[in-house]
Amino acid sequence: MSESGCQEANDNRGNPEQRPPRPAVGNKVTVVLGAQWGDEGKGKVVDLLAQDADIVCRCQGGNNAGHTVVVDSVEYDFHLLPSGIINPTATAFIGNGVVIHLPGLFEEAEKNDRKGNGLKGWDKRLIISDRAHIVFDFHQAVDGVQEQQRQEQAGKNLGTTKKGIGPVYSAKAARSGLRICDLLADFNQFSERYKMLAQQYKAMYPTLETDVEGELLKLKNYAEKIKPMVRDGVHYMYEALHGSPKKILVEGANAALLDIDFGTYPFVTSSNCTVGGVCTGLGMPPQNVGEVYGVVKAYTTRVGIGAFPSEQKNDTGDLLQTRGKEVGVTTGRKRRCGWLDLVLIKYAHMINGFTAIALTKLDILDVFSEIKVGLAYKVDNQTIPHFPANQEVLQRVEVVYETLPGWNSDTSAARSFEELPDNAQKYVRFIEEHVGVPLKWIGVGKSRESMIQLF
Ligand code: GDP
Ligand code: IMO
Ligand code: MG
């Protein structure tokens, strides 16, 4: 740039009259995030908030997630679709950060549509970002082979859901992945890239069985089916944020301790399930993030392998498992169970900045005469001030518990805070004080109605 051009630009900046006005922030999104190892009851919290939402979004993960929503005694389960699609007036948006297995998506929509009141007009209300990556059947097969190899080579696997999540996010980072926009462009070019990718996997995993031509044929059909749903996701979100006032809800999948950066690595999933994933997974600025609700189960569960400091491999754990019906929605595996661990809730809050908490499944604790809550970690008899990154250290931590009296009575019919037994009220307030975040909801059952709202 010439010296005079540079001078001119400086002059403009110096004159407030000539500066463009500060851009309007626009609508803010409300975010629901898991604060533990998943299955906290995010689906139920989303369902509550989605009843008057205009747009419901997923920003990360794939069909490794399993979110249950119970309406009029009918149980719906969502994996890839935002659970809020159950509101017949909401538009559902699958953002660029999500990885999509197309057969899985249609199977899920059709299965839920056959239940209860169904998902009225779901195919007209679903928008898919053209930048989202596609999970192919071979990614799922590779997930299985990798798990088998981990078992053979290291004596333990990760316990993945085998939905192809690790392989597809790896391909995304390696820049060999294929996206929805590629599927909808020139199909011959797409087929070439698809075959190349399949060959790469075949070279790495010779036992892998792939039906390249068969899958391409199916993909061509899916391309036609999704064409009317696909948009430029960034433009779609921009319009949603800056058009008329709208209620926009973002449904986090998986959870803080499964986050690829902040979770109990390597026993984590492959996406950012903390608040940063909202911006990168939808293509929107942080200034548009509004309320961030953390979902916390009144005790702790974990599916799959990895350190779990407050795990109870005893009668307590068994009772939590059976009373809580703690079985994975996606894989049918029994969930490991333990006491509530506030060290990890505080850690999740440091990353996400929760504006309020939804505490779920309080009713499951109804039969315990004493309830323990983890308050601190000790390593080699020293209290540590942080949540350890290293898994060997996390395996060794000793949890310092506070024991609170139980309430030994049924809370499932309570519909207000005052209707909860004294000791249940104390348990809830204890959590709130220790985490330093207000509790907005308390769950005492599966249904929509069994959610106590505090403010
Ligand atoms: P998500 O993955 O976080 O959406 O949670 P899941 O759906 O995988 O698991 C939570 C399970 O707990 C589901 O079966 C819910 O129906 C159930 N649930 C949610 N909130 C409550 C509650 O407050 N009480 C009871 N008893 N069950 C609940
Ligand atoms: P929702 O959304 C519980 C766990 C798996 C495994 C690890 C990696 O229902 O809370 P992956 O298939 O993602 O590569 O598996 O992460 N995992 C979950 N556990 N709830 C989930 O989702 C999970 N999503 C992934 O069990 O240990
Ligand atoms: Mg789940």
Image (cartoon, rainbow, N blue to C red):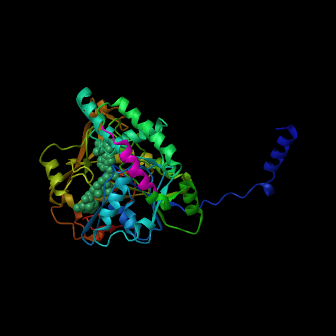
Of the four image quadrants, the one with ligand 1 is: bottom left
Write the residue at 37% across / 29% down.
203
4 relative to 297, above or below: above
Q: Position of residue 43 (x, y in %)?
A: 34, 60
Tell me which residue sits at (88%, 41%) in the image: 4
Task: Report whether 98 appears left or right of 320.
Answer: right
Q: Residue furthest right?
A: 4
User: Where is residue 336 shown, x and y percent of the image?
Assistant: 21, 46
Residue 357: image quadrant is bottom left
Magenta-colored stretch includes residue 303: no
Query: Which segment is the magenta one?
Result: 209-223
**Residue found farthest to the left:** 315
Say how many tags the image has. 0
In-front residue for pair 87/302 = 87
* In the rendered image, the vertical position of residue 274 relative to residue 454, given as above or below: above
Quadrant showing the N terminus? top right
Q: Position of residue 389 (x, y in %)?
A: 37, 34
Query: Main structural element of the magenta stretch: helix, strand or loop?
Result: helix
Residue farthest along the top direction in this orientation = 153
> Is any part of residue 173 visible from this angle?
yes
Q: Nearer the viewer, residue 339 or 81?
A: 81
Q: Residue at x 56, y 61 (%)?
A: 241
Q: Quadrant of the C terminus?
A: bottom left
Question: Quadrant of the rendered structure where residue 234 is?
Answer: bottom right
**Residue 18, horizontal then vertical, whole percent:** 80, 55
User: Is 213 above or below relative to 228?
Assistant: above
Residue 269 visible here = no
Considering depth in this image, is 47 or 167 the residue closer to the camera?
167
